Image (spheres, helix red, strand yellow):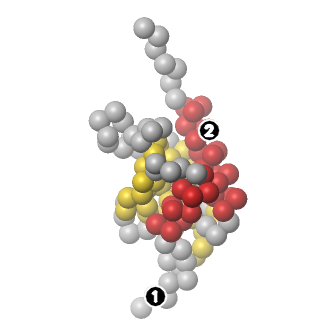
C-alpha cells in the first residue's frame, strides 16, 4: 500500500479559503485528487489538484455559469508548495486576475 506523504486537496482548499477570507465559498470533491472551491458570489471556481506522494499542488480556475454548471478551466497555476500559504494566496489572486483579463466586455443595454 502506498504511504501518504503528500497533501489532501480538501485540506489545501480549506487553507486557501481561510487565507483569502472567502467566508461564503464552499468546497466540493471533484475527483480522487481534486477539490473544487466554489465561489458563487463571483461566479468562479478554483480547483486544487494534489498528490498523496508529494506536497506540491496545482490550481485551476474557471467560471460558474448562470445555470450553476461549471465551465472548463481557463487559467492554471504552476506547481506550488501546498504548505506555503503565501504562495497559495498569491496564486489564487493571480488566477482571479487572469479570469478578469479573459472576461469578455459587458454589453451595454
Query: Viewed as shown, does residue 48 lie left or right of 83?
Result: left
Tag 2 near tag 1, CB within 8 Å: no
Give x and y (percent) for residue 5.
Answer: 55, 83
Task: Decide which of tag 2 and tag 1 comes sooner along the chain.
Answer: 1
The alpha-carbon separation of the residues under discs 2 and 1 comes to: 38 Å
Q: Quadrant of residue 64?
A: top left
Determine crowd level at label 1: few under 14, some 14-19, many 20+ residues with C-alpha closer than 10 A: few
Indicate the quadrant containing the N terminus: top left, top right, bottom left or bottom right: bottom left
Residue 94 shows in this picture: yes
Q: Is residue 13 left or right of residue 27?
A: right
Q: Residue 63 got which mark? A: none
Q: Residues within 10 Å of mark 2 (few under 14, many from 20)?
A: few
- Residue at 63 percent across and 46 percent down: it is 93
As helix, strand or loop, the secondary structure at mark 2 comes to: helix
Nearer the observer, 82 or 16: 16
Residue furthest bottom as drawn: 1
* Label 1 secondary element: loop
Q: Position of residue 17 (x, y in %)?
A: 54, 56
Q: Could you tell me which residue is drawn at 49 percent across and 88 percent down?
A: 3
**Labelled disc at residue 97:** 2
The image shows residue 9 at horizontal and vertical percentages of 48, 67
- Relative side of 76 to 41, left or right: right
Residue mark closest to the camera, 2 vs 1? 2
Query: Which quarter of the rendered picture does the C terminus lie within?
Result: top left
**x and y percent of residue 53 in the render?**
53, 79
Tell me which residue sits at (70%, 59%) in the image.
Answer: 86
Query: Which residue reaches farthest right?
Result: 86
User: Which residue lies most toward the top here?
Assistant: 109
Q: Residue at 42%, 42% (x, y): give it.
A: 40
The disc placed on residue 2 is 1
Amino acid at each position: 500500500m502506498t504511504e501518504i506523504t503528500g497533501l489532501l486537496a480538501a485540506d489545501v482548499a480549506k487553507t486557501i479559503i481561510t487565507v483569502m477570507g472567502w467566508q461564503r465559498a464552499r468546497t466540493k470533491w471533484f475527483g480522487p485528487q481534486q477539490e473544487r472551491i466554489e465561489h458563487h458570489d463571483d461566479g468562479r471556481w478554483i480547483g486544487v489538484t494534489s498528490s498523496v506522494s508529494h506536497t506540491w499542488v496545482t490550481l485551476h480556475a474557471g467560471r460558474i455559469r448562470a445555470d450553476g454548471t461549471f465551465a472548463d478551466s481557463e487559467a492554471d497555476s504552476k506547481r506550488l508548495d501546498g504548505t506555503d500559504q503565501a504562495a497559495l494566496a498569491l496564486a489564487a489572486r493571480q488566477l482571479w486576475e487572469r479570469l478578469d483579463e479573459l472576461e469578455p466586455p459587458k454589453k451595454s443595454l
